Image (cartoon, rainbow, N blue to C red):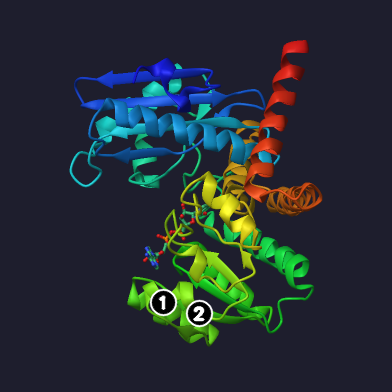
Amino acid sequence: MTLFDSTAFEGHEGVHAFSDEKSGLKCIIAVHSTARGPAAGGCRMWPYADAEAALEDALRLSRAMSFKNAMADLALGGGKAVIIGDSRTQKSPALFEAFGASVEQLGGRYWTAEDVGVSPADLTHARKRTRYVAGLEGHPGASGDPSPVTAEGVFRGVQLCVRRALGRELDGVTVAIQGVGHVGGYLADKLHAAGAKLILTDVNAEVLHAVAARTGAQVVAPGAIFDVDAEVFAPCALGGAINAETLPRLKARVIAGGANNQLADAETGRAVFNHGLLYAPDYVINGGGIINVAGEIRAIERGEAFDVGWVDAKLDRLARTLEEVLDRAAAENRPTNEVANEVAKARITIAAEKRAAA
Ligand code: NAD
């Protein structure tokens, strides 16, 4: 593959490769779009097999961030950084300082944050060389753990989907949650408080039993979660939960959860639609976390404290966006994931046209 042949490259404004011999840094920062504002997306550290694999991941993830940020109605574009290396053995303060210097070279076109393999502690080193870092603790604009906000957005989305697909409120509805870590755990609490009955699973038995004990939930083995009698299936673990093998087993009428990349591929979205299930597109319903991060970027840029009210208003708007997607998909009799992609692309194109005309 050459860079320009990659289907993932499509639409990218810029792709930047940085290296620092002293610290061993090798990183790629992909900026998909700054049409709506500076590109924002986390930094992932991963032992990629080669630079090509790292590039492909950076491109795919940065484009996904553009879509997610547009659907969350944020004045942010999409970007992503990947550092090639093993986060367990190859981290050092110097490496993250060099990463910070790389971010700084983009002059504010890209804001970084944590992602897989990168912690807030790592980012404090990056922060020594650039101000374009979100997700740090101990300053007035700090946004803290995004998971409760993600879970609140998912909760509102589940509520909306249940009203539409089942014509009822959450009280008495059975929800199966796959993965009760940060997002799934908070979601379980909120659903329990709303009167939903829960069936939970997790590969981490300790976490699973703690959440089940406080929510009175039934517990099943990880592989059994696709077969339970539940009206809602909420994927809150890793990607790819909905695939050709699991979809026919689901008895649920609604798929709505916090995980990223829930569908194995785009065709699965069509299969979900053909099965008559209502699917809340993942990057729309789980936009609460990036809204929280955006609240921090906004606070830093304005030199103000973090504004919880602003975040809450954006969560309301996110629920309306989800409703718009579901309305249009219903009116056009099409899969919700396809409609979401179209709406996201249109929002980015409109912003790009406005910018060009200004
Ligand atoms: P987490 O690691 O805290 O929780 C994930 C949980 O899933 C863990 O408890 C893990 O043991 C469990 N798990 C993993 N594989 C499993 C399997 N096969 N079956 C059952 N359980 C399994 O992560 P999180 O922060 O809660 O994120 C969960 C998902 O939501 C991820 O896909 C993440 O990308 C996405 N997401 C998170 C946020 C956020 O704010 N944290 C925002 C947007 C999207």
- Label placed on residue 189: none
Q: Amino acid at mark 1?
A: Ala
Element type where label 1 sits in the image: helix
Left or right? Give the position of 114 relative to 323: left
Left or right? Give the position of 122 relative to 61: left
**Label 1: few (<14), some or many (≥20) within 10 Å?**
few
Up the image or down, 181 lies above or below 298; here it is below
Question: Between residues 262 and 303, which one lies in front from this camera angle?
Answer: 262
Q: Amino acid at mark 2?
A: Val
At x 77%, y 65%, the residue is 164
Q: Determine whether the beta carbon of the residue marked 1 sits less than 8 angstroms from the nearest atom of ligand 1.
A: no
Query: Circle 1 sits on which residue?
Result: 224
Left or right? Give the position of 1 relative to 250: left
Up the image or down, 162 lies above or below 317; here it is below
Left or right? Give the position of 14 relative to 190: left
Quadrant containing the N terminus is top left
Query: Circle 2 sits on which residue?
Result: 228
Image location of residue 21, percent across then percent down: 20, 20
Image location of residue 151, percent across then percent down: 59, 62
Tell me, yes or no, if residue 129 can be seen here. no
Question: Between residues 344 and 208, which one lies in front from this camera angle?
Answer: 344
Report if the CB atoms under discs 1 and 2 are less than 8 Å apart: yes
Image location of residue 146, percent across then percent down: 54, 54
Element type where label 2 sits in the image: loop
Question: Between residues 333 and 262, which one lies in front from this camera angle?
Answer: 333
At x 50%, y 51%, the residue is 260
Which residue ends up furthest to the top in the rendered image?
357
Up the image or down, 3 lies above or below 301; here it is above
Quadrant containing the C terminus is top right
Up the image or down, 239 lies above or below 19; here it is below
Q: Determine whether the beta carbon of the residue marked 2 sits less than 8 angstroms from the nearest atom of ligand 1.
A: no
